[in-house]
Image (cartoon, rainbow, N blue to C red):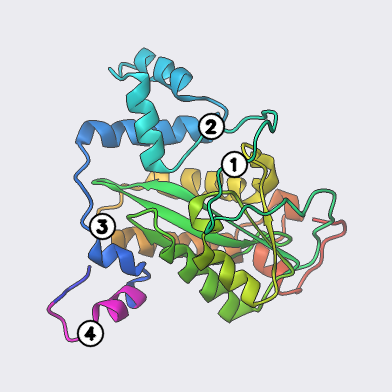
């Protein structure tokens, strides 16, 4: 954990722990045990049925014995950074603001079969024994390889930018980079990094989880195969265990969509797919 009296600067301690700088300076408001239990269950239900809204989640939670109302469910969903996913007509453009430009989706009908052709990212909620974190990952679309990741206890932009900069420093620049329309990814801080490298920015249509389906599948794997099996007692423990899992995910775990090859084998070209990814 961060030691403010240590001779190492706080920024350097964050780097060694794999934490976003905001984690060291932000003092989160306490969340009740009851709400933490609710958030864990909402996360599980949302992962199985991402099309359920706050009303239907409320009904399911009440049947399970949770005395909760729709507004409370909706408030917890906002805190967790999750939203209902569904198809809807595009009747109006989303609010953007001068520092949050929305980009078109560029990958429709495009064959993505080469490493570094397209990367994608997303943020997900990670429950802990006491509290919770947010996890961001940068993924190569063709190989499903996780190139970089970060955790944070706030939904700020800096930990997303740090993960992006690490991936670019280690693996170069992709041709396309796909995100959702979240404030972290539409911010100038994030898009400026992409534009400075000449990367084409692509963004999902609102409510279209299929536009970033491979990252959604990553979250399902991470949670069922790692997060839900452990009650992390600290941020350091969460980062350690997630690091072990992503190493396994990249190097050892075969993917059905990759003809049971590992992401490392496809990304580094030691083995090739018979068909397009």
Asked whether disc 1 touches disc 2, contact meaning CB atoms under 8 Å apart, the reply is no
- Is residue 255 rendered magenta in the image? no
The disc at residue 234 is: 3
Is residue 9 found inside the magenta-colored segment of the image? yes
Judge whether residue 57 can be spotted in this image: yes
Q: Contact, CB < 8 Å: mark 4 with mark 2? A: no
Calculate the distance from the C-alpha at mark 4 to the C-alpha at mark 3: 21 Å
**From the viewer's perspective, is 138 left or right of 107?**
left
Foreground label between 4 and 2: 2
> Dot 2 corresponds to which residue?
84
The x, y position of residue 82, in whole percent, is 47, 39
17 to 6, vertically: above or below: above
Residue at 20% x, 56% y is 27
Report how far apart the C-alphas of labels 4 and 2 lie in the structure.
Answer: 43 Å
Q: Return the disc, 1 or 4, that comes first in the chain's sequence.
A: 4
Q: Which mark is residue 94?
A: 1
Which image quarter: residue 206?
top right
Residue 69 percent coordinates (x, y): 33, 18
Q: Nearer the viewer, residue 246 or 92?
A: 92
Task: Return the disc, 4 or 2, that comes first in the chain's sequence.
Answer: 4
Residue 75: percent from the left, percent from the top?
Answer: 35, 32
Mark 3 vs mark 2: give the one in front: 2
Q: Residues within 10 Å of mark 4 (few under 14, many from 20)?
A: few
Residue 153 appears in which quarter of the rendering? bottom left
What is the quadrant of the N terminus in the image?
Answer: bottom left
Q: Secondary structure at mark 3?
A: loop
Q: Circle 1 — which element? A: loop
Q: Earlier in the sequence, mark 3 or mark 2?
A: 2
Disc 3 to disc 1, C-alpha distance: 37 Å
Decide which of tag 4 and tag 3 comes sooner along the chain: 4
Tell me the number on the disc at residue 8. 4
Marks 1/4 in contact by CB < 8 Å: the verdict is no
């Amino acid at each position: 954990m961060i030691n403010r009296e240590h001779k190492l600067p706080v920024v350097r301690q964050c780097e060694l722990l794999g934490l976003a700088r905001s984690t060291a300076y932000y003092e989160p408001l306490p969340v009740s045990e009851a709400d933490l239990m609710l958030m864990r269950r909402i996360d599980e239900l949302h992962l199985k049925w991402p099309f359920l809204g706050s009303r239907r989640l409320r009904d399911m939670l009440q049947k399970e014995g949770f005395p909760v109302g729709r507004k409370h469910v909706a408030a917890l969903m906002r805190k967790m950074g999750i939203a209902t996913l569904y198809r809807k007509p595009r009747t109006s453009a989303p609010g953007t603001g001068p520092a949050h430009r929305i980009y078109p989706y560029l990958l429709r009908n495009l064959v993505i079969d080469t490493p570094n052709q397209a990367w994608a990212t997303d943020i997900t909620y990670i429950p802990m024994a006491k509290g919770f974190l947010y996890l961001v990952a940068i993924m190569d679309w063709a190989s499903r390889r996780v190139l970089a990741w970060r955790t944070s206890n706030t939904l700020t932009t800096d930990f997303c930018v740090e993960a992006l900069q690490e991936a670019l420093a280690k693996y170069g620049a992709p041709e396309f980079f796909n995100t959702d329309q979240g404030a972290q990814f539409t911010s100038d801080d994030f898009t400026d990094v992409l534009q400075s490298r000449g990367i084409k920015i692509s963004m999902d249509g609102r409510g279209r989880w299929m536009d970033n389906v491979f990252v959604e599948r990553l979250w399902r794997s991470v949670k069922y195969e790692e997060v839900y099996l452990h009650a992390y007692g600290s941020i350091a423990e969460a980062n350690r265990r997630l690091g072990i899992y992503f190493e396994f995910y990249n190097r050892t775990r075969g993917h059905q969509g990759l003809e049971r090859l590992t992401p490392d084998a496809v990304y580094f070209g030691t083995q090739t797919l018979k068909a397009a990814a």
